[in-house]
Amino acid sequence: MAQHKTLKLSSLLVASAFSSLSYGSGFALTEQSVTGLGRAFAGSAAVAEDASTIFFNPAGLTQLKHTEADFGLNYIAPQSDFKDKGSSVPNYGGLGGFSGQPLTGGNGGDAANDAIVPNIYFSHPVNDKTVLGIGVNAPFGLVTDYNDNWKGRYHAVKSDLKTININPSIAFQATDKLSLGLGVNYQKIDLKLTQMADLGARAGFPQGQGLPFKTDGKVRMDADDWSWGYNLGATFQATEATRLGLSYRSKISHTLEGHSKLRDAQGTIIADEKIKGDVDLPESASFAIHHQLNDKWAVMGDATWTRWSRFDELAIESNGPVLGSTKEEDWDDSMRYGLGMTYAHNDTWSFRAGVAFDETPIPDAQHTTPRIPGEDRTWVAFGASYKYSENLTLDAGYTHIFVDDPKIDDTDDNGYNLTGDVDASVDIVGVQMRWLFL
């Protein structure tokens, strides 16, 4: 029974890992365009300002009349500080007096790690009706890292997710007003996660209460996968000044495979098994409008729906007796709304700004984990472009994301309860070079 109790923690590591992959606001990186960053990505399915439209709406490629190469870097600086509100240990057999006692440890420090997210796009008009393009980007990513001895160490220590997405696309002018686009996405996910395991529980003693067998083991999971998806889009030039955009990104079904290892306090491996888990990154659809007020000012807006409701549970398989579990998620569909504006000051300088509201799909504190403590987000952004020459344009953007304080009330299968609030925010700075082959 004691071994079963410890090994459940390893199982939950895998389950929480896959749930982390599916977080729209924090794990799904919207930062795929520096020009878009400067307007909080408002109207991105209709703007088609540069080759980054490959990601947001491939039909927008028909707006680009010259071969173009874009190179962008986004520096993402999140902040996430946990504040304990009564986290507690479970009831260990006959030591019922320890049931509900506070978990030992600190608050984990600032768990959010800074990251640089690149994106590269290339577009080429084949003729006056057809444009080809390709994008390489990172649509999902996260690094969070808590101290090994923090209160939530049995829920999460380190989470490190990297993705690479290769997105060849084609667009063609179907009529004078209508353009259609199609993209294929070939995506790799590489995931590494750790958490602590209370090996002292095997002897019936609660961890961290000053009793014998006070020792923590460590669980590490490594898994990866390549998979396919697609994106579709259409733009419609309703009037000379108004363009509508509609885009759709398919779900991408991943089967992540790898190993999970449990080490004792001395570093000896006491469990090593192959694991596998299926997860669908959900489909999304966006409707956008771009309206040119005059030769200097333009406004844009959009609404984006993401089908997180398909993410109801996770089943983890193992080739041995240690791992394997089903974790309930019950996420909701979410919406994102954005409004933006651009101002062409002269032939050299242009400016942009925007705001957005991004709903969290996580239904309540009981479904929130410290790996990705999500809540509703409000974006405030501004940016600028400098046309250095006929061929070269330099772009920059800045966004601050205000995050409603996430609340965690998460109890794992072993009875460890992590309760608290998270003080979170995000700052993003992006720079980009656009080169036109004239």
Image (tube, grey):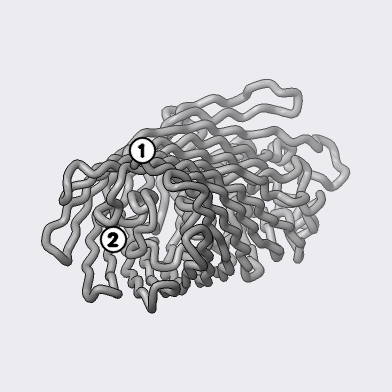
Q: Amino acid at mark 2?
A: Ser
Q: Is residue 54 above or below residue 4?
A: below
Identify the residue shown where x is 31% and y is 42%: 67
Q: Which of the numbered marks, if any, corresponds to residue 166?
A: 1
Judge the density around disc 2: few (<14), some (14-19), many (≥20) Cα neighbours within 10 Å. Answer: many
Q: Tag 1's secondary structure?
A: strand
Q: Is residue 288 left or right of residue 224?
A: left
Q: Tell which of 161 and 368 is nearer to you.
A: 161
Seen at 69% across and 37% down, the residue is: 202
Q: Is residue 41 above or below residue 135?
A: below
Q: Which mark is residue 247?
A: 2
User: Disc 1 to disc 2, how far (Cα)?
Assistant: 18 Å
Residue 185 appears at what percent x and percent y? 31, 42
Q: Quadrant of residue 159?
A: top right
What residue is at 39 percent from the left and 62 percent from the top? 44
The quadrant of the rendering that contains the N terminus is top right
Rendering coords of residue 167 (x, y %) = 32, 41
Farthest residue to the right: give it. 210
Residue 33: horizontal and vertical position, in percent? Answer: 46, 52
Which of the two labelled residues, at mark 1 and mark 2, occupies the earlier sequence position? 1
Q: Is residue 167 visible?
A: no
